[in-house]
Amino acid sequence: MKTAAWLVAALTAGHQAATVSGASLPLTETTAAVLGLDEVHAASASSSLPSPQPQRQQKHTPGRYGKFLHITDLHPDAHYMHGAKISSACHISHKKEKKHHGGNFPPLSRVRAAVSRIYSAMDAVLPFDFGAQVKTDDAVSSNKAGYWGSPDSICDSPPTLITGSLRWITENWLSAPGKGKGGDLSDKKEHGDNDHDDDVGFDFVLVTGDLARHDVDAQQHPRTLPEIYRSNRWTMEQIELAFPDIPIVPCVGNNDIFPHNIMFPGPSAVTRELANIWSKHIPEFEVHNFQRGAYFATEVIPNELAVLSLNTIYMYDSNKVVDGCVKSKKGKPEKDRDAGTVMLDWMEVQLSLFRSRHMQVHIMGHVPPTAGNFFPLCYERYTDIVLRYQDTVVGQHYGHMNVDAFFVQEDEEAVMFDTTADNITASDTSVHTYSLSDDLQDDYATLPGRKRTNLNYYHTFFVTPSIVPTFLPTIRVYTYNNTRSVKSTASQFIEAKDAQLQHLTGDDHTDDDDDEDEEQDDDERAVFPTSRSHRRRHRKHKRKKHRKKKLPRHASPDSPARTNTYLSMLGYSQWVLDLDRANAEWEHRHADQAGLLPFGKSKKEEDKLEYELEYVTYDPETLWEPYLDVEDGGGSRRRDRNAPVPKALLDRLLERAGVEPPHYIRTEEKEEQRTFVAAVANSFEDKLRCAFAHALGWTLFSSSTHISSRCLASTMGGTTETVVLLPSRAGKTLKLRLPKALKHLTDYSMPSLTVEPMMEFARRLASDRKLWKRFTGRMYQGLR
């Protein structure tokens, strides 16, 4: 009792006391009560993950696996109640509890125990599975909160969803799945690494913010700063337990502060508390930077790859206590300068330092850098810095929007050289009435053609879907090129980049004009004449008055952002959770088992989630390489790289789909060529093409091939069949047989995530209606 009283007193004393109480306490029954969790949630949270001293650890070797994990927007809600009304944010009203129970509301675990006894009695007297069906139907109804979460709702994540998702990741990506209970890496240390161990593991983990719930139930459960700190601490502890000895890089989200969206410049109590919670992940020499603004840099592969964790709240236009990245006079004290400006100055210096050390950098944050999210000056300055350091920035990763999307960044100088943009005015960039998908479609459709594109002026960034079930919980696993044999010599790479140094030719203000910058209204800022402003609000176009100092542009076609080389991003696999099915299975299983298991037998080990592969960006040969014969593929496939998806997960996918794995087939040529070909073409050119093909003895194949030259071969009955000409080969041809149930997984088929393939993919989306429909479906709905 004294411990419980001390905890309650500490929590009510403020955020500093909350830090003391939650810093080192395990998630026991008492701690769970203070957090607002019942015993069931506490048990699931503690039992689904390793103990505070985990036995299953991934021995970390920087850059070993060529993979990293990105999770975002977890939003754990300690007040989430299984079976509550979704319309109440999946919370139970305190007033209704007191009204129905005379103010003496029993513990939630006792209520659940009583419900279980009722269903057990029903099972004894009613037909088999009747009680289970009733309970399942009630739980998965549209207005009842599911055990694992409630998709397409205003509800946040139950703690069970967080712990269950992390457990699925650890059991399938950090150890050999299918071997015992997910495998044990301690056994591998004793007996040596096996082949499968090379395929599973992460080199680092990105967590892009929002580790606290939304403020959607302010009347019954208003958010408080101590609760936000407790939620962040609890979530980070679960992530740390799941990924011991792996670099974890967090960043602050707009719901990790109070009130949400509002954050003053540091140092402050907020930055100090977050520094305390994230102390294991912030380098000691970065603590000062973090306390002044909650941003920092860390090297995930020492001397080769770094991550900049930005505080995008300082650039977010919903933050009304900052000035929006306005410039200031030289010599002005930092405390009097805008927080966003200070951070962007720091970011530019960091990129310059990392570039001088021949390193590559990932940039991460919570709010994506679009003109609809950022202040105008913040958006322009951020985009300008990233594009000027294109040879150093290898990737950009964001969350917040709860959707699956990628954006193209374009320098205004690229538009100046694009003659197709001459007639586009500032009013054309006002797309605030469009949806996100409409905006992206405009972005992709207005990209210049491949021949007219100067890739030095472009970059892309990714927005990853959330774990919180706004749509469906989603996890993304990236792969990157970790083959050091293709790494360019550092000195040669830098020399090549500096040799191709370019200069900006646009206008800018000199330092003497900084006062005018501060006074200039946002509506008078110039806008880029392109829709790639990403939902930019309408602002009048006004010509700038002063010449800009020329700033260096660091771009090279040999950089990892442009060419598939060491540290280039290769692709990603995206995994989603079918919450409706998971909830129904949980209800059915627990209704079936109520009162039937022997005394003392735990059911917790059966409460597991199973994420499913939604799609990958790789081509079919890359995804299904573990099943393909290298010799049949002509020996061109490489076996010295890590598979993008563990084979055990692919095995389960094939089992669920009920299909055989993809494989190469040999197609023997007919000894006798067709003797009669009637070419019925629409033009003389097509007739010549068909006649020339026939003269060379080419074989006619079906229209399923990718050869665009088509002829119509007349048949005996006078009908026609569409055939496609395919060059004959010496005796046989090779073709990958891919079952129809698996084709949607690889319909993007991109060679890498470098700038040029991403822009080609954007053009494909703009021109292919079927692919665009699938892309937008994945953007909002998750599981297809």
Image (cartoon, rainbow, N blue to C red):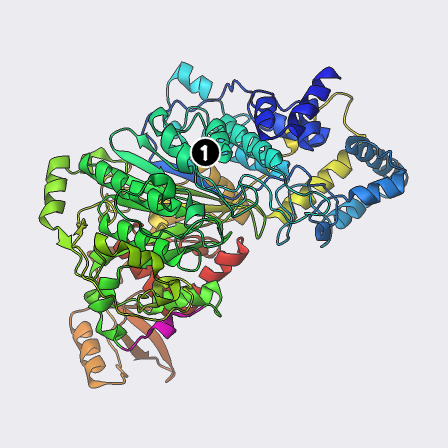
Of residues 500 and 638, the one drawn nearer to the viewer in this rendering: 500
Q: Is residue 265 left or right of residue 31?
A: left
Q: Which of the 4 image quarters holds residue 36?
A: top right
Q: Is residue 572 left or right of residue 457?
A: right
Report if residue 429 lies within the magenta region. Answer: yes
Where is residue 208 shown, x and y percent of the image? Answer: 45, 42
Q: Residues within 10 Å of mark 1 (few under 14, many from 20)?
A: many
Of residues 296 and 765, the one drawn nearer to the viewer in this rendering: 296
Name of the residue lying farthest toward the top: 190
Of residues 142 and 332, the one drawn nearer to the viewer in this rendering: 332
Where is residue 455 shown, x and y percent of the image? Answer: 22, 58
Extent of the magenta region? 423-431
Where is residue 246 shown, x and y percent of the image? Answer: 41, 27
Q: Is residue 471 left or right of residue 204?
A: right
**Is residue 549 positioned above or below 710 on the image?**
above
**Is residue 188 positioned above or below 528 on the image?**
above
Q: Residue at x 46, y 24 (%)?
A: 244
Quarter of the rendering occupied by the N terminus: top right
Q: Is residue 685 left or right of residue 652?
A: left
**Is residue 514 positioned above or below 246 on the image?**
below
**Is residue 601 positioned above or below 702 on the image?**
above
Where is residue 314 shown, x and y percent of the image? Answer: 42, 47
Q: Which of the 4 image quarters holds residue 523?
A: bottom left
Report if residue 121 lies within the magenta region. Answer: no
Q: Quick check: can you spot residue 80?
A: yes
Tag count: 1
Q: Residue at x 60, y 25 (%)?
A: 17
Q: Residue at x 26, y 81 (%)?
A: 679
**Residue placed under numbered mark 1 in the picture:** 173
**Element assignment for label 1:** helix
> Which amino acid, by three-letter code, is at mark 1?
Trp
